[in-house]
Amino acid sequence: MRTARAISLLLLLQARRSMTGAELAAELEVSERTVQRDVLALAEAGVPVYADRGRAGGYRLLDGYRTRLTGLDRAEAEVLLLAGLPGPLGDMGLADPALAARLKVAGELGEAPAAGARRFHLDAPGWFRDAPVPSLLAEVARAVWGGRLLRVGYPRRSGVGSGPGPAVEAITVERLRVLRPYGLVLKAGTWYLVARPDDDEAAAHRVYRVDRLAAAEALADRPFRRDEAFDLAAFWDAKAAEFARSLLRERVTVRLSPHGLDRLPHLLEPVAVQEALATVGPPDAHGWVTVRLPVESLDVGYEELLRLGPEAEVLEPPELRRRLAEAAARAAARYGPPQR
């Protein structure tokens, strides 16, 4: 930790030319005394760092001294800075190496980090929901990053106790297989682990929700041989599409106005929209078209089609058409002329 902090201190001075002890302490989240010790350690290692006294004083490097970042042009380094978006990396326990990488690039690019931050920001969670960081995420990320096996467990709940009050829920950990952790995916604020069971060479990669783990331990002394042909992004895209399709168990025949057809991609999952658009028939004289719309269930379809209001007419199945007709009648009565 001290070595990593000293390197960060060096890179900060290189990027900003001069910083006070208080500024360095705030940036590195340590005390000013710790900053003094780290500066002394750098000086003893041969780094030409010195302190200026007085009101405008601070720590600085000897003019002309700098570590070198080679092999990257400006455009490549600016893109690298965007890979260091702080939130998810901090959640995984990778904030320190991310900071060091950004500082190295900053030493070469000057204002590029600030320019990138002004132009791009990642807000991963969906609207109207909180996305707490799973308590075991950093341990899972440590196994993924280090290529080490991961032992995980899920909670087993049981009601215990007796008496007039409610049962007290006891939670124990049920051990599962040791996993080969291939990657982490952040989807709409939820973290997923992609892994294979270690005891089954023929097993396919599976997806585990990190927030549902009750225990996770990176096995530091047990590395695994990674299948380098495995493509995490391609796997996730295929798995996500497969999951979305598996939920669409019902089909509804709907007439849509031109506006309703335009609204469809804003209301439904892309997989459902893609399938529906593939069934679009020729428009009638008023521009309305008929589609076969996949939905998770008739109850879900009812809620989704209500959002289209008068821009949609359900033709089949009859029970869904009847429910929507009743809803339309209630709405018409609600918005009818006021009674005197």
Image (tube, grey):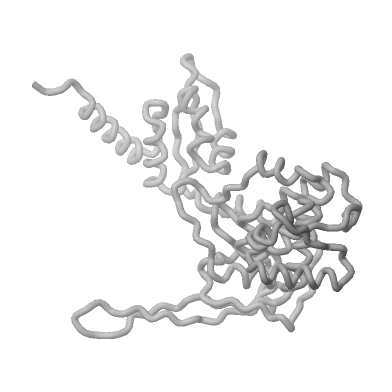
Front-most of 239 and 294? 239
The quarter of the picture where the N terminus appears is bottom right
Q: Is residue 95 visible?
A: no
Check the image and report above or below for 86 versus 117.
Answer: below
Closest to the observer, 229 or 139: 139
- Residue at position x 52%, y 27% in the image: 262
Quarter-wise, where is residue 93 in the image? Answer: bottom right
Which residue ends up furthest to the front in the rendered image?
54
Residue 172 locus on image (x, y percent): 45, 82
For residue 180, side relative to residue 340 (left or right) = right
Question: Percent position (x, y) of residue 321?
Answer: 34, 35
Q: Position of residue 60 (x, y in %)?
A: 80, 57
Q: Quadrant of the C terminus?
A: top left
Q: Position of residue 257 (x, y in %)?
A: 46, 23
The correct choice, above or below, for 282 with respect to 250 in the image is above
Residue at 33% of width from left, 80% of height from top? Answer: 159
Residue extending farthest to the top is 285
Q: How many dots with numbers?
A: 0
Left or right of 323 on screen, residue 215: right
The answer to whether residue 297 is above or below residue 280 is below
Observer able to see residue 97:
yes
Whether residue 129 is situated above or below residue 199 in the rendered picture: above
Judge from the rendering whether residue 144 lies leftward or rightward of residue 333; answer left or right: right
In depth, the one of 292 and 5 nearer the eye is: 5
Determine the residue positioned at 62% across, 78% down.
Answer: 217
